Image (spheres, grey):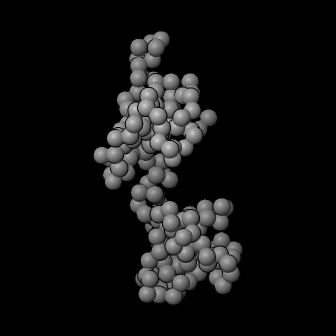
Amino acid sequence: MALDVELLLAAMAPDIDARFERLYGYLNDDLTRRRPAIGLALELCGLPAAGSGRFRFQPSAPLVAGGLLEIGDPERPLLSRTLRVPDRVTAHLLGDDETDGRLRGLVHVPAPAASRTTGRRPTGSRRRSPRAAAWCTCSTGAATPRGWPSRRSPPPAAAPSSWTSRPSRRPVTGRRS
């Protein structure tokens, strides 16, 4: 798991700071290649390029299968292929809470309910993570993707047990406590 995080950070670095593009061009020994190659990323993580770490880039590997890491240049040998993190993943990891554009018609983000004691919306409700609000339950009820059954109807057979659990009394704030 830690290796996956390191590989993800190595691939994301040029999107965070443009100076990494020059660095990767220099390390790749080709100034036109401004993204890390698989072999370079493995070496930066302290693994030999010929070792078992190269299996982290197979289509069934978690980072690739989950869409967190894209591998470019399919015509090149495996160790020379470039790594890239999709823009939406980078934005999310940098704190962007917007719902992915591909999901806008499918996910309903409910407005925060007024407080029972003050009649006002909770402080910071505008900054609340739509992602968290769309998938968490709180004292105001459950949020479900549009078109899915309401909380009163039985859950789908494949629904995770967390969808059927009792709502918590803590409001969803998008922050870890």
Q: Which of 7 and 74 is in front in this view?
A: 74
Task: Find residue 35 and report its horizontal and vertical position in percent.
Answer: 48, 75
Vertical relation: 175 (above or below) 53: above
- For residue 30, side relative to residue 50 (left or right): left
Task: Find residue 81 and report its horizontal and vertical position in percent.
Answer: 49, 81
| Labels in figure, total | 0
Q: What residue appears at the point 61 percent right and 61 percent down from the top-left corner?
A: 5
Q: Which of 92 and 74 is in front in this view?
A: 74
Q: What residue appears at the point 57 percent right and 40 percent down from the top-left corner?
A: 161
Q: What residue appears at the point 46 percent right and 24 percent down from the top-left corner?
A: 140
Q: Nearer the viewer, residue 52 or 143?
A: 143
Q: What residue appears at the point 47 percent right and 63 percent down from the top-left corner?
A: 67
- For residue 161, side relative to residue 151 (left or right): right
Vertical relation: 127 (above or below) 49: above
Q: Nearer the viewer, residue 159 or 86?
A: 159
Residue 49: name its quadrant.
bottom right
Residue 88: name its quadrant.
bottom left
Q: Which residue extends farthest left?
A: 105
Task: Find residue 129 and report its horizontal and vertical position in percent.
Answer: 45, 39
Residue 128 seen in render:
no
Task: Find residue 133 and report its horizontal and vertical position in percent.
Answer: 45, 36
Assign the N terminus to one quadrant of the image.
bottom right
Vertical relation: 85 (above or below) 46: above
Residue 71 seen in render:
yes
Assign the C terminus to one quadrant of the image.
top right
Q: Which residue extends farthest top?
A: 117
